[in-house]
């Protein structure tokens, strides 16, 4: 499987229903450099596992909608929006955040990532800013 296929499969994975995603997709020595609206975080394997455990406790459903997916060797860049259904309101799906991530893969797993996220807003969604682009 190519690095691009691995990254695509991870972002299309149902993280809420299946709790083995971190072990399946992340290298044990991974690092994620994440700039978000809350500031910078450097996460390792255990931090990422704790993050997804929290996601599993908070959301009824979570999905990513990819607009861009580009590969250069072992590096894959993706631009996507995450949508969620909360436990309190499982009938309504809401956009949570927009992301751009660059991943280096090692041994077929996500190894070193650089990610920027911003809370989702209606203007970007209504403008189709995150519509899928075929590249």
Image (cartoon, helix red, strand yellow):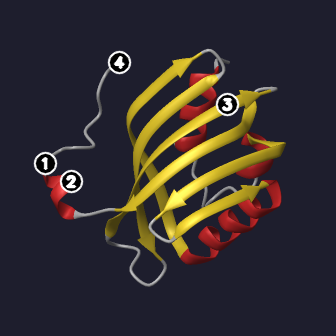
User: Circle 2 is placed at which residue position?
Assistant: 124
- Report the mark closest to the observer, 3 or 4: 3
Q: Which residue lies furthest to the front in this view?
A: 40
Task: Give the left or right position of residue 31, taking residue 128 as reference.
Answer: right
The vertical placement of 20 against 4, above or below, is below
Mark sitting on residue 127 = 1
Distance in Å between CA atoms under marks 4 and 1: 20 Å
State if disc 1 and disc 3 touch (CB < 8 Å).
no
Q: How many marks?
A: 4
Task: Please state if 89 lies on the left or on the right of 72 as rendered.
Answer: left
Residue 115 on image: x %, y % = 54, 48
Callout 3–callout 4 Cβ contact below 8 Å: no
**Of marks 4 and 1, which one's residue comes earlier in the chain?**
1
Residue bearing mark 3: 104
> Do the residues under discs 2 and 1 have CB atoms within 8 angstroms?
yes
Crowd tier of the residue under label 2, counting other residues whose Cα lies within 10 Å: few below 14, some 14–19, many 20 or above: few
């Amino acid at each position: 499987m190519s690095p691009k296929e691995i990254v695509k499969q991870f972002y299309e994975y149902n993280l809420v229903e299946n709790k083995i995603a971190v072990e399946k997709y992340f290298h044990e020595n991974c690092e994620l450099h994440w700039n978000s609206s809350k500031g910078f975080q450097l996460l390792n394997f255990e931090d990422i596992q704790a993050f997804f455990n929290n996601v599993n406790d908070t959301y009824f459903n979570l999905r990513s909608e990819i607009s861009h997916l580009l590969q250069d060797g072992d590096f894959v860049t993706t631009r996507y929006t995450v949508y969620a259904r909360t436990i309190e309101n499982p009938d309504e799906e809401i956009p949570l955040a927009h992301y751009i991530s660059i991943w280096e893969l090692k041994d077929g797993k996500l190894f070193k990532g650089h990610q920027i996220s911003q809370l989702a807003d209606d203007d970007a969604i209504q403008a189709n800013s995150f519509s899928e682009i075929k590249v």
